[in-house]
Image (cartoon, coloured by chain):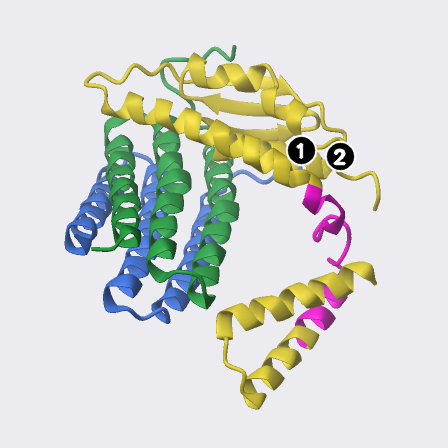
Chain colours: A yellow, B green, C blue
Amino acid sequence: MKHSISLGLLLAILWWCLSGYPKPLLLGLGAASVVFTLWFAHRLDVVDHESHPVHISGALLAYWGRLTVEILRSSAQVIGTILSPKPAIAPYFLRVKVGQPSDLGKVILGNSITLTPGTVTVLVNGDELLVHALSPVSGEGVSQGDLDRLIPADCERQA
Amino acid sequence: MMLADVISAGLLGVGAAMLVIGSLGINRFPHFYSRLHAAGVVDTIASGLFLAGLAVHFGPGLVTIKLLLIFIFLLFTSPTACHALARAAYSSGLREPESEDER
Amino acid sequence: MLFVIAIAVLVAMALALLRAFLGPTVFDRILAVNSFGTKTVLLIALLAEASGRGDYLDLALLYALLNFIGTVALLRYTEQEPRRQGQP
């Protein structure tokens, strides 16, 4: 129930942001589509803690900050590689063990690695990630598990 | 010229330069997996700078919220598309030609 | 100023198209088309500023959605081997 209410609120805010006209007809259409989407999501059975993680919103903000710094640092590196007259790249695949117990933690880690220029998550296999790195410099941080340690530990404690 | 305009033009200019650099990388890097990394620069940094520049121009309001929505959407879909591409290429048997060893 | 930036974006799009034509594997082409789509979104957003109409941003948002779904749909066609059991 908690998740349905927060999803409904989110949808209503989204409608308001995209439309922005306080006319009765448009507001009515918006309310109808919010109700329809909620009913649809319930039929699909996708409203749960995983599709709609209300409980971790606060803890993730600090993580996003660190991730932004990481992205800026490594994209400067990749841009330097692209612009150098002879790109010195040594691409390779590496396997890393994931410390995250939950599926959500693994997804966050995999997406963060892909989002950072220079490394891409290729496969997720149990608690092992197959990562492709542009050069040993880019892959170093991933193999040492820098981002892994930063993800909030209580990702999925309360469901 | 107002200060906001200068900041906006600066952000847009840097973002556009990043776009060109990223596309240059897609053409310069030798194999598929390394090209993937060049496209990553475009998606994350360049679109962020570009949309920030537009947000400075439009100022606070509904339009800025829309720009933020576009940015959040790109932020969530671009790694997903990138990962789907890498996974599809890997599972169809595409490998790096010169570095077969998996360190 | 906006004119110069628009030209830069168009140059980037042309470079992405070049890779889409040259790309040896089908994945290179899909990558190039996906990147082309991202730049289209940014170009439409730029058009919104140049014409002073925020409404164009709705088109940019819609194009971002279509671009993602199109990429994933294209990738479905490249899957040849049946998916192994037990793999997520």
Residue drawn where x is 45% and y is 34% of the image: B89
A51 inside magenta stretch: yes
Q: Quadrant of the N terminus of chain A?
A: bottom right
A44 inside magenta stretch: yes
Q: Is residue B79 left or right of residue A126?
A: left
Towards the viewer: C52 or C86: C52
Task: Tell me, yes or no, if residue C84 can be seen here.
Answer: no
Q: Secondary structure at mark 1?
A: helix
Q: Position of residue A9 (x, y in %)?
A: 69, 67
Q: Quadrant of residue C2?
A: bottom left
Q: Position of residue B38 (x, y in %)?
A: 34, 32
Residue drawn where x is 45% and y is 19% of the image: A138
Q: Is residue A87 left or right of residue A8?
A: left
Outermost residue toward the front in this view: B2
Q: Secondary structure at mark 2?
A: loop
Looking at numbered disc 2 in the image, what kind of residue is underneath it?
A: Ser
Q: Which residue is mark 1?
A: A106
Looking at numbered disc 1 in the image, what kind of residue is underneath it?
A: Lys
Towards the viewer: C29 or A13: A13
Q: Residues within 10 Å of mark 2 (few under 14, many from 20)?
A: some
Q: Which residue is mark 2?
A: A102
Residue drawn where x is 52% and y is 43% of the image: B80
Q: CA distance from mark 2 to mark 1?
A: 6 Å
